[in-house]
């Protein structure tokens, strides 16, 4: 079985964000068929269409990383019932120039999280609305909204909550099968 590189986009800039901790846990739990490249967004400059004729190096590097991948996994918190602005900016950068989205054809997974009760479901649903037309197929089942994530990690950022580990492993199994099917 081939190893597929998955750009795992962290939708939060916070150094101790739950999204980053979840992405790092996923990278450790991933089956051998997946290599998760945990990618933070702090170095991606703001999208400005005026710069498209001569795009900044950070845009080009991000786009190239996506183009070389076999898929994309979004791990995001929910901000004000939507995705964080930094994640939307990264999607805008990746989707340009028009008709040449670096996400085009890339199979996508979405994991949202929150210390609250709803698990970031609105953020996940907004990604499901934004991505069609600029990305590839989105894994529909299982959906994953990690709620109450605040106590899932120790002070070193290691996943300690067994129920979350089990859910992440189940998701990764389904995502690995989805990636294999889409990359045939």
Image (cartoon, rainbow, N blue to C red):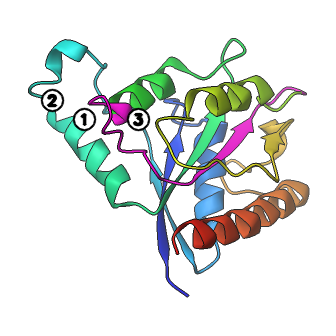
Residue 40 percent coordinates (x, y): 44, 41
Q: Is 43 rendered above or below residue 29?
A: above
Binning the other alpha carbons within 10 Å of mark 3 as few (below 14), some (14 to 19) or many (20 upward) gives some
Binning the other alpha carbons within 10 Å of mark 2 as few (below 14), some (14 to 19) or many (20 upward) gives some
C-alpha distance separating marks 2 and 3: 17 Å
User: Left or right: where does residue 8 sit relative to residue 124?
Assistant: left
Q: Which residues are magenta?
A: 94-117
Task: Choose mark 2 or mark 3, whichever is in front.
Answer: 2
Residue position for label 1 = 59
C-alpha distance separating marks 2 and 1: 6 Å
Does the image show residue 29?
no
Question: Which residue lies at the image location 73% right of the left edge and 50% below the top edge?
Answer: 154
**Residue 47 sits in quarter:** top left
Q: Please name whichever residue, 73 or 179, is drawn nearer the observer in this view of the structure.
A: 179
Q: Quadrant of the N terminus?
A: bottom right
Residue position for label 2 = 55
Binning the other alpha carbons within 10 Å of mark 1 as few (below 14), some (14 to 19) or many (20 upward) gives many
């Amino acid at each position: 079985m081939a190893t597929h590189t998955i750009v795992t986009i962290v939708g939060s800039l916070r150094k101790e964000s739950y999204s980053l901790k979840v992405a790092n846990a996923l990278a450790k739990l991933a089956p051998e068929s997946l290599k998760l490249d945990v990618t933070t967004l702090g170095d991606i400059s703001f999208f400005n269409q005026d710069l498209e004729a001569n795009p900044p190096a950070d845009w080009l590097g991000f786009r190239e990383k996506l183009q070389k991948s076999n898929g994309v996994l979004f791990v995001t918190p929910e901000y004000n019932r939507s995705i964080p602005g930094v994640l939307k900016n990264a999607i805008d950068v990746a989707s340009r120039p028009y008709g040449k989205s670096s996400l085009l054809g890339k199979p996508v997974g979405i994991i949202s999280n929150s210390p609250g009760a709803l698990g970031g479901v609105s953020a996940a649903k907004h990604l499901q609305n934004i991505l069609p037309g600029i990305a590839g197929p989105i894994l529909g089942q299982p959906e994953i909204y990690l709620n109450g994530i605040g106590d899932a990690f120790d002070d070193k950022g290691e996943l300690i909550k067994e129920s979350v580990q089990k859910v992440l492993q189940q998701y990764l199994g389904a995502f690995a099968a989805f990636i294999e099917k889409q990359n045939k």
